[in-house]
Amino acid sequence: MSTLTELWVERSNLRQTQIVEAERAPLKEGQIRVAIDKMGLTANNVSYAVSGEMIGYWKYFPAEGGWGKVPGWAMGDVVETRCDAIGLGERLYGFFPMASQVVLEPGHVADDFFMDGAAHRAPLPALYNQYRRTKGEPEFLHALEDERCLLFPLFITSFVLYDYLIDNDFFGAQQVIIGSVSSKTGFGLAHLLKHDSGLNKAVIGLTSPSNMDFVESLDCCDQIVAYGQEDAIDQSVPSAWVDMSGDGPLTGRLHHLLGDNMVESCIVGATHWEAERGRGPDLPGVKPSFFFAPAHIAKRDAQWGAGEIWRRGSEAGARIAQEVAGQLAVERICGAEDVADIWRAMLDNAVAPSRGIMISM
């Protein structure tokens, strides 16, 4: 394959896309070329795009002008190599752009992973620079490639949030309220909390009326509340708000509803990416803050050893993925035009949470 196909998204207008085809550039010494086989497309990809400027997600795979390449978690195969440590045909798992191929620069190569050593990626969160070499991994992981792309990264984030709450003794909260609980990160967190018998914290999930049956089928919440019915939440107990929606007015309503009983308020995702971000002035309760998972991972790396929280999160993610697999129908969408269409559908919240979308250029 002599040409490279990429899907570019206008950073200031995420619905505007263009398909870019170009001749492959020759590899430099130390580089590898990876054919991207399949990528999971979830609300997480939307969050990467929405927070691309703030956190730097657009910088991992730069595009020209005001365009960007939306990243995501994918499987790929090494189709050309000028790196002695990485062999032709190796299968990799990691953070890739929406493209048919990508060039990486392996550095710090270990038996089971390597770090991309490209200079432009050095200042960025290292979590996304690691690529797993799958040949030595257990067979059960080989059989869960789709789940690994669709669910594992989100469930690892769920685990990091779960551990963050435990590490802070839930900030004194007796119940955890999860916004956009139908999202994979949302129901992953709910599952971990509800099925940990040692916690005894009520799990409240907020979702749209159309998604309530799906959330009910997952058995991950003590109470499911439709948007607009927030007054059904117990306002008399200290509460932690974990928001996957990024909906500012929703956060504002909950703060005013709970008052000083809002003891933690962290913003994680942006499933409601077009909602207003403003939450109103002088909110009662704790001040809302943005949750940056790599910061908590770095803390645990220092305490537990490098990679340990990732290992624990991966194991937890695998367990959840196997338990909910029957509730998720995997669909494969191939070709740049069709990928662009499903990307816009994801932006429009027109993809049911029970659909697991795997894309390929």
Image: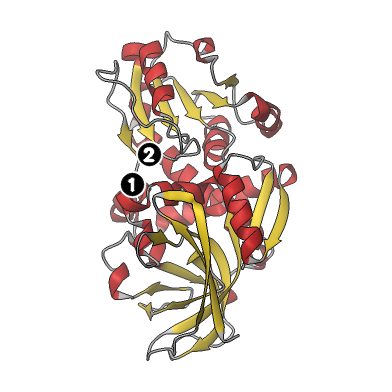
Looking at the picture, tell me which residue is in the foreground, 314 or 18. 18
- Kindly identify the residue that appears in the image at 62 percent across and 59 percent down: 339
Q: Secondary structure at mark 1?
A: helix
In the image, residue 14 sits, relative to residue 226, either above or below, namely: below
Q: Position of residue 194 (x, y in %)?
A: 56, 30
Label 1, on which residue? 296
Instruction: Check the picture and name the quadrant holding the N terminus.
Output: bottom right
Apparent side of residue 143 relative to residue 89 in the rendered image (left or right): right
Q: Position of residue 217 (x, y in %)?
A: 71, 32
**Residue type, mark 2 in image:** Tyr
- Kindly identify the residue that appears in the image at 53 percent across and 16 percent down: 228
Dot placed on the residue nearer the N-terminal end, 2 or 1: 2
**Residue type, mark 1 in image:** His
Residue 95 shows in the view: no
Q: Position of residue 357 (x, y in %)?
A: 65, 53
Label 2, on which residue? 164
Q: Position of residue 240 (x, y in %)?
A: 40, 25
For the image, the number of numbered tags is 2
Q: Secondary structure at mark 2?
A: helix
Apparent side of residue 206 relative to residue 48 in the rendered image (left or right): right
